[in-house]
Amino acid sequence: QVQLVESGGGLVQAGGSLRLSCAASGSIFSINAMGWYRQAPGKERYLVATKRSGGSASYGDSVKGRFTISRDDAKKSVYLQMNSLKPEDTGVYYCKGSGVRTGDGVDDYWGQGTQVTVSS
């Protein structure tokens, strides 16, 4: 059974930094892309950043230049370094593994989410 577990959320003042981590576990052969999505109350889930295995990263327009995504494929982990945080960055941050290959085939998986709150 594949699980993605996030950590590192919390409360921070505007201008501060946080680092989120997500680790995948289970009988995983490979993961095509790992990324982070944000969902604020009453809003749709928003792509924050994603990174393909061995490929370049993509970012949502609102976080470019402030956030950095990185992966450790050996640890099946993805990280999100968030700098210069703004109140509008507040939300639940979800980790997603796309194209996760196991013995049962290929599928996408989500973590349970971690809350990030940025105070003004």
Image (cartoon, rainbow, N blue to C red):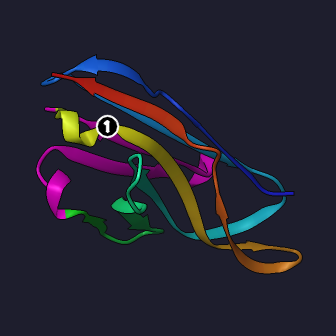
Name the residue carrying label 1: 90
Residue 96 in which image quadrant: bottom right
- Which image quadrant: the N terminus? bottom right
Q: Position of residue 90 (x, y in %)?
A: 31, 37
Q: Position of residue 23 (x, y in %)?
A: 62, 43
Taking the image as shown, residue 88 lies to the left or right of residue 52, namely left
Task: Confirm whether the magenta stretch covers residue 74.
Answer: yes
The magenta stretch spans which residues? 61-84
Q: Position of residue 109 (x, y in %)?
A: 67, 63
Residue at figure coordinates x 38%, y 57% from the top left: 43
Residue at figure coordinates x 13%, y 32% from the top left: 84
Residue 51 in which image quadrant: bottom left
Placement of 71 over or under 85, stated as above or below: below
Compare residues 94 and 104 and report the one nearer the observer.
94
Taking the image as shown, residue 68 lies to the left or right of residue 92, namely left
Placement of 54 over or under 116, stated as above or below: below
Residue found farthest to the bottom: 105
Taking the image as shown, residue 114 lies to the left or right of residue 60, namely right
Placement of 42 over or under 89, stated as above or below: below
Placement of 24 over or under 45, stated as above or below: above
Residue at figure coordinates x 42%, y 56% from the top left: 37
Q: Residues within 10 Å of mark 1 (few under 14, many from 20)?
A: many
